[in-house]
Amino acid sequence: MASKYINITLKIWRQKDAKSKGQIETYKLDNVSTSSSFLEMLDQLNEQLVGERKEPVAFDHDCREGICGMCSLYINGRAHGPDTKITTCQLHMRSFKDGDTIYVEPWRSKAFPVIKDLIVDRTAFDRIQQAGGFVSVNTSGRTMDANAIPVAKFDADRSFEAAACIGCGACVASCKNGSAMLFVGAKVSQYALLPQGKVEATQRVLNMVRQMDEEGFGNCTNTGACEVECPKGISLENIARMNREYLVASIK
Amino acid sequence: MAKSALLKSSLAKKYWMALTGLFLCLFLIGHLIGNLQLLATGENAALNFNKYALFMTTNPAVKLLSYLTYFSILFHAVDGIVLTVQNKKARPVGYVKNSASSNTVWASRNMAVLGTLILVFIVTHMVNFWAVMHFDENMPLQKVEIEVGGMKQELYLTTDGGYMPVAQVEQGNVEIKHRKDFYDANAHVKLKEGYKDLYKVTVDFFKHEKWGLLATILYVFAMFVLAFHLYHGFSSAFQSLGLNNPKYNSLIKNFGKAFSVVVPLLFASIPVFIHFILK
Ligand code: HEM
Ligand code: SF4
Ligand code: FES
């Protein structure tokens, strides 16, 4: 596909640090190749800003191939922009037209405070993981062969699908309640479906949900925004599985 | 920990929301079946409805169910408001540009507003009918007019299948106690029991000269609100309880959608029928 060049207007959230009050700033950016990724477009903007001796826009990114979950932008009112099943680094400028105005904002959640500009602190997810998102195994050199325990293909597939979650936080960002239940549901399911994970299943779900609540995430009302915006297509089924696991664990 | 987990945690609040919501759906079915008798027009329509109303206010099993219903409405409303307030706090700074309609349906985003409107409706509805039935001193008793030898005579219908002439009450021989019992004015013994005429109260309400039309319109509007609440709520409750299985999901979703249309529609048909069609 031959690439075109477009001129765009950007409305970007600028915030000096966690304590400052931020605001939307407007930038004009010309000659953006439609073949460039959204992050490359932001690089181009930053070069322009540096050239003007202005502070470049701070934004998160790492792998730039849709696997690390770092790129976290709310673009034109949607997590990771207009397309679905992609991260921001996989969004391309061909999704926009010449003359478009594009809003770029950070994830908004009490549990994800803004650090600077478009970068938010997502360590709340790490603390939820640390509360139970693991299987305790002895790794002293006598680990068992993983395939020694047979796993039904159906369960293995569901577990693998849940494990595809990259912890990007788009679910929280797009949920009107700032709920993290798709993320936690995926992490709970990933282990609950496997025999190795069943051993600690009860404590895991109780601890992870407790940590999730403590971090200040909202409560799911099943609107389904997360499932639509999740770059990895994590299904709402995982939230239901977490709800089941938790119900059984609380009664035990 | 397990105990507090079943009351205070985010998920527990959701379980209670779903359980009370689904119980209220069952209540709607029961209430609807009762109300649909108002569509009947035969000679005995009023009596049958009033008999049913008497049963509903006196049967002990029904009483138990009605307390469960009051509790569910209160708990559902309080829990729903607590959840909504918490959810608002989870995003203290909102988006400048947000495109919610690209990933969610309207009803799902407005459950709290829809629920609050339903609460306002339930309170008005109870003031208009429930409180009248239970407490109003002027609650009418069901009467019939018959001709005896060319003379028109008014009679109260009584629960033993008999009559009590209105004249007896007017002349002071019989007095009405507890808003329904006929007592011998001198001997102070109970003679018979009349039927509270809820049928007449309802028909008069929706046929009222001044505000019968407004009442009908508002009732129909409330049923629209209920429809949207249920459109999202019905299947949502199953998801909250973890009852999500690819085999049954579309069944639950489709049943919920049908339920959300059919139940409010049938409810709404009743005042429309009374106001526009009933003679
Ligand atoms: C006949 C009356 C009602 C019925 C049948 C009903 C039914 C339901 C159902 C089935 C749900 C879904 C529960 C879930 O997602 O787990 C729900 C949610 C909700 N209801 Fe009601 N409801 C009624 C009245 C009310 C009232 C009076 C309020 C008052 C505020 C209310 C507020 C809410 C809210 C805020 C939700 C969303 C809560 C959430 O998903 O976390 N509802 N309702
Ligand atoms: S569930 Fe999806 S949207 Fe949420 S963190 Fe995981 S990958 Fe991102
Ligand atoms: S930068 Fe790694 S997923 Fe986008």
Image (cartoon, coloured by chain):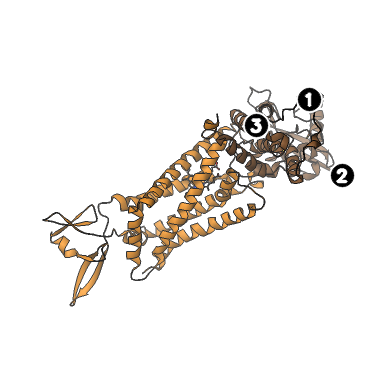
Nearer the camera: disc 1 or disc 2: 1
Q: Residues under labels 1 and 3: Cα distance?
A: 20 Å
Q: Mark 2 belongs to which amino acid?
A: Ser
| Residue identified by numbered label 2 | A3
- The mark that comes first in sequence, 1 or 3, is 1
Figure quarter occupied by ligand 2: top right
In-image side of A126 versus B157 (left or right):
right
> Looking at the rendering, which quadrant does residue B161 occupy?
bottom left
The reply to whether residue A168 is in sight is no
| Chain under numbered label 2 | A
| Residue identified by numbered label 3 | A204
- Chain A takes which shade in the image? brown
| Residue identified by numbered label 1 | A139
User: Is the distance from the Cβ of mark 2 to the nearest ligand 3 atom less than 8 Å?
Assistant: no
**Residue A190, how many percent across, how many down?**
71, 37
**Residue B266, how many percent across, how many down?**
47, 61
User: Is the distance from the Cβ of mark 1 to the nearest ligand 2 atom less than 8 Å?
Assistant: no
Task: Pick whichever, B110 or A198, lies toward us.
Answer: A198
Quadrant position of the C terminus of chain B in the picture:
bottom left
Q: Secondary structure at mark 3?
A: helix
| Chain under numbered label 1 | A
Q: Counting other residues with Cα less than 10 Å from the Cα at mark 3, is it few (<14), some (14-19), or many (20 or more)?
A: many
Q: Mark 1 belongs to which amino acid?
A: Thr
Identify whether B178 is placed above or below A157.
below
Residue visible at 46% across and 39% down in the picture: B78
Residue visible at 80% across and 41% down in the picture: A92
The reply to whether residue B146 is in sight is yes
Residue visible at 55% across and 50% down in the picture: B234
Which label belongs to residue A100? Answer: none
